[in-house]
Image: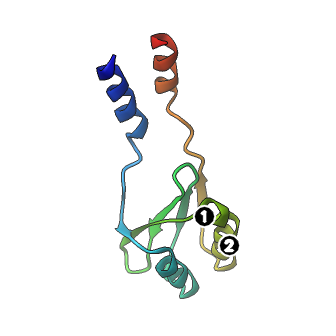
C-alpha cells in the first residue's frame, strides 16, 4: 500500500520539474517592466511563472494566489505573450486512486 502511494505521488508530480533560474517576484516584476521577459507561462496549480528572458536564459518565479490578477495585468500591459497552464491532475492518478480505494 505504501509503495502504491509513493508511486502515485511520483506520477502526479512528473512533468512539473523546475526549469530556469529562480527569480524573486520583485526581480521578475523589474524584468517585465524593463522589457526583458520574452514570454510567460502561468502555472496556476503551483503558483509559478516560467518562461524566457531576452538574453536567452529561462526563469521561474513564484507568486501568492491573491496576486494572480495583478500579475496577469502587468504581463498584458508589457505585451508579454502569456499562456496559462491550469495544471489539471493526471487522470492516471485519479483512476489508480479509485481502483485502490
**In the picture, which quadrant includes the N terminus?**
top left
Image-quadrant location for residue 71: bottom right
Kindly indicate whether the residue at mark 1 contacts the one at mark 2 (C-beta within 8 angstroms).
Answer: yes
What mark, if any, has residue 82 been given in the picture? 1
Q: Position of residue 48 (x, y in %)?
A: 50, 60
Q: How many marks?
A: 2
Instruction: Identify which residue, 18 or 9, lies in the foreground.
Output: 9
Neighbour class for label 2 at 10 Å: few (<14), some, many (≥20)?
Answer: few
Task: Identify the residue at image location x=45%, y=75%.
Answer: 24
Residue 63 shows which numbered tag? none
The residue at which mark 2 appears reads as: 76
Q: Quadrant of residue 9?
A: top left
Percent position (x, y) of residue 14?
37, 40
Mark 2 or mark 1: whose residue is earlier in sequence:
2
Q: Picture coordinates of residue 42 (x, y %)?
A: 56, 59
Residue located 56% across and 48% down the image: 45
Work out how far the residue at label 2 is from the one at label 1, CA to CA, in angstroms: 8 Å
> Judging from the image, what secondary structure is the residue with disc 1 in?
strand
Relative vertical location of residue 16 with respect to residue 8 in this rendering, above or below? below
Residue at 39% over, 27% down: 8
Name the side, left or right, on which 87 lies relative to 7. right
Outermost residue toward the front in this view: 2
* Furthest residue in direction left, as rendered: 3
Tell me which residue sits at (60%, 68%) in the image: 81
- Secondary structure state at the residue bearing disc 2: helix
Rendered view: 43 above or below 58: above
Amino acid at each position: 500500500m505504501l509503495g502504491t502511494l509513493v508511486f502515485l505521488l511520483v506520477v502526479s508530480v512528473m512533468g512539473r520539474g523546475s526549469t530556469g533560474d529562480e527569480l524573486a517576484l520583485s526581480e521578475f516584476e523589474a524584468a517585465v517592466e524593463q522589457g526583458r521577459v520574452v514570454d510567460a507561462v502561468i502555472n496556476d496549480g503551483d503558483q509559478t511563472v516560467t518562461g524566457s528572458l531576452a538574453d536567452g536564459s529561462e526563469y521561474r518565479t513564484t507568486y501568492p494566489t491573491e496576486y494572480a490578477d495583478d500579475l496577469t495585468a502587468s504581463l498584458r500591459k508589457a505585451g508579454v505573450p502569456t499562456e496559462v497552464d491550469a495544471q489539471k491532475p493526471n487522470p492516471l492518478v485519479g483512476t489508480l486512486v479509485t481502483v485502490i480505494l
